[in-house]
Image (cartoon, helix red, strand yellow):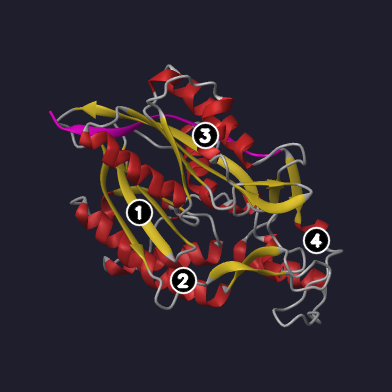
Amino acid sequence: MPIKTVIIGSGRYLPELIIKNEEFLTNEFFNDKGEKIPKATKDIINKLQEITEIEERRYLPAHLNTSDMGFFAAEQAITNAGIDKESLDYIIVAHNFGDLQDHNRKVDMVPTLASRIKHLLQIENPDCVAYDLPFGCPGWVQGMIHADYFIKSGDAKRALVIGTENLSRIADPHDIDAMIYSDGAGAVVVEGLETNESVGILAHKTRTDTLNHAHLLNMGVSYSADFPDDTLFIKMNGRKLYEYAISTVPTLVKETIEKAGLHISDISKVLIHQANAKMDAAILDRTFKLFDIKEWPKEVMPMIIAKMGNNSVATVPVLYDMIIRKELEGQEIKSGDNLVFASVGAGMNVNAFIYKVP
């Protein structure tokens, strides 16, 4: 019988430190030319909230790091799956900046976060292969695609896929975009199920556009003179990124749905990267229009960005975990539901997979 990749457990870690928009009122914001933005800070904050819907976000406390968050989410996912951790064949960890000390913004990725998390989990099995996947915000979705290949090839039976990111320590406090970013981790355990039923990961698709879009997200110096010239922060060309996302994500999602032999009307939920509420709504509008449908039911695209902010690779697995645990009001995932998992981010990369709940 064919092998299908199914999710058997999930978990998440969200820092307890909640940073509300009001806490940015004392920040001074500058543009990319180093000029102070003349607009009142309160007005800047209100405008960003209007576009993104972000009211608050989570920041990691000083004594913890990115790998710690991944470990906490992994522990929860393993417990939820009810498996022996030694039975894992792969640990795939999506992130982009490694561990960042609170007092030192330099990226630390040796050993890999996957190796650190495997060590924290105290897994002895040497055949459990642990590796990192830096792929921009779509990293966790790509990790799921990797796991699907391993499982369907027969090379693996179980895999742990983690998305963990600490953006608060790599964000320029003088850059308006800093208010978008947050910290967190999400994880799932997947395993191979031998069945003739059409369940699990049905189809997936990925694209990378570098010719004109490679540097829409990159690293650069602070917009203020407060930091040395060798201190790098995450930088984003928001306007161009928005245009790229709304022009590429709908097409890729449509192609992935059709690759699975489905129609948009067969889709119960679209779990999309929580980057910007306005952008995500525009993406779904365009996706439905590609299927000649003008309006879509709002419950199809659950959103958590208002309270969580954008924690990069963690947004999609955290969203899934909240719904599966019935912690998101008005949202549920049932057996037989067809789900779209999709993301867009640095690279520029776009990806999606279709998942039918067993």
Q: Which residues are magenta?
A: 1-15
Residue 16 vertical position relative to residue 207 in the rendered view, above or below: above
Q: Amino acid at mark 3?
A: Ser
Q: Is residue 128 visible?
A: yes
Mark earlier in primary sequence (3, 1): 3
**Labels 2 & 4 near each other (Cβ < 8 A):** no
Q: Is residue 3 magenta?
A: yes
Mark earlier in primary sequence (1, 2): 2
Residue 146 vertical position relative to residue 86 in the rendered view, above or below: below
Mark earlier in primary sequence (2, 4): 4
The residue tagged 3 is 115
The residue tagged 1 is 352
Q: Residue 311: give x, y in percent of width and height.
A: 59, 51
Q: Main secondary structure of the magenta part?
A: strand
**Labels 3 & 1 near each other (Cβ < 8 A):** no
The kind of secondary structure element at disc 1 is strand
Q: Residues within 10 Å of mark 4 (few under 14, many from 20)?
A: some
Kindly report the distance in space between the C-alpha atoms of the residues bearing marks 2 and 4: 30 Å
The residue tagged 4 is 24
The kind of secondary structure element at disc 3 is helix
Q: Amino acid at mark 4?
A: Phe
